[in-house]
Amino acid sequence: MFTYELDERTVLKPIAREHVQALYELTEMSRDRLREWLPWVDSTTELSHTEQFVHNAMKQAAENGAFTAGIWVDNELAGMIGYHAIDWSSRSVSIGYWLGRGYEGQGIMTSACRAFVEHALIDLDLHRVEIRCATGNRRSRGIPERLGFVLEGIIREAQKLPSGYVNFAVYGMLQKEWKQLR
């Protein structure tokens, strides 16, 4: 299995069966913070739910080329990042991500997203990358903003969370824009 080194402490590794326990434990440890923005958290209550997620992610990677990676800091799982299904006909993809408790505010996710955007737009030769974030999630929104994404609009009441419906900010980056920013 490959690893992609972001810096001397941080690597990306494709999610695999041997990561299930660490992923479940990180989710449990971060549950109260994650559930504010991620709808799947309340339905991930057993190890088997995480096993199913990992199975589905590995299947998607095999079938579509999209993949999900764990973000490992000092050999500890810190979070997740992944491409949602790649639309090969439009040559576009969206990226989703989250960090566990204690790993925020260190630039980890910005570095991981930069690597994923570079891979999508340069290595995979895709035309467009999109990131959607709840408008109230300032930390998450800061990532595409720091990377130079364009805020393309707001989708009203795009997702139901335990607190109610939230609006999404939609950020986009085109390959030609990324090449100019590199």
Image (tube, rainbow, N blue to C red):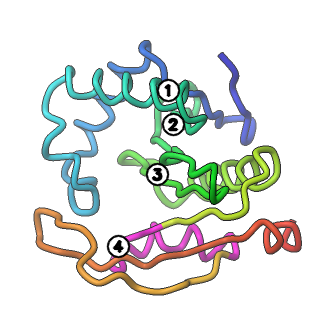
**How would you rate the neighbour count of disc 2 (Cα within 10 Å): few for under 14, some for 14-19, many for 20 or more?**
many
Disc 2 and disc 1 in contact, CB within 8 angstroms: yes
Instruction: Give the position of the N terminus as an image quadrant.
Output: top right
Precedes in sequence: disc 4 or disc 1: 1
Precedes in sequence: disc 4 or disc 3: 3
Precedes in sequence: disc 3 or disc 1: 1
Can you say whether 38 is above or below 119 in the image? below
Q: What secondary structure is marked by label 1?
A: loop
Which residue was labeled with disc 4?
A: 134
**How would you rate the neighbour count of disc 4 (Cα within 10 Å): few for under 14, some for 14-19, many for 20 or more?**
many
Q: Nearer the viewer, residue 103 or 47?
A: 47
Q: What secondary structure is marked by label 4?
A: strand
Is residue 139 a member of the stretch shown in magenta?
A: yes
Q: What secondary structure is marked by label 2?
A: strand
Which residue was labeled with disc 2?
A: 68
Can you say whether 41 is above or below 134 in the image? above
Residue type at tag 3 = Tyr
Residue type at tag 2 = Thr
| Span of residues in magenta | 132-148
Numbered mark located on residue 97 in the image: 3
Which is closer to the viewer, label 2 or label 3? 2
Quadrant in the picture for residue 6: top right
Precedes in sequence: disc 2 or disc 3: 2
Residue type at tag 4 = Ala
Is residue 43 a member of the stretch shown in magenta?
A: no
**How would you rate the neighbour count of disc 3 (Cα within 10 Å): few for under 14, some for 14-19, many for 20 or more?**
many
Which residue was labeled with disc 1?
A: 15
| x 45%, y 68%: residue | 132
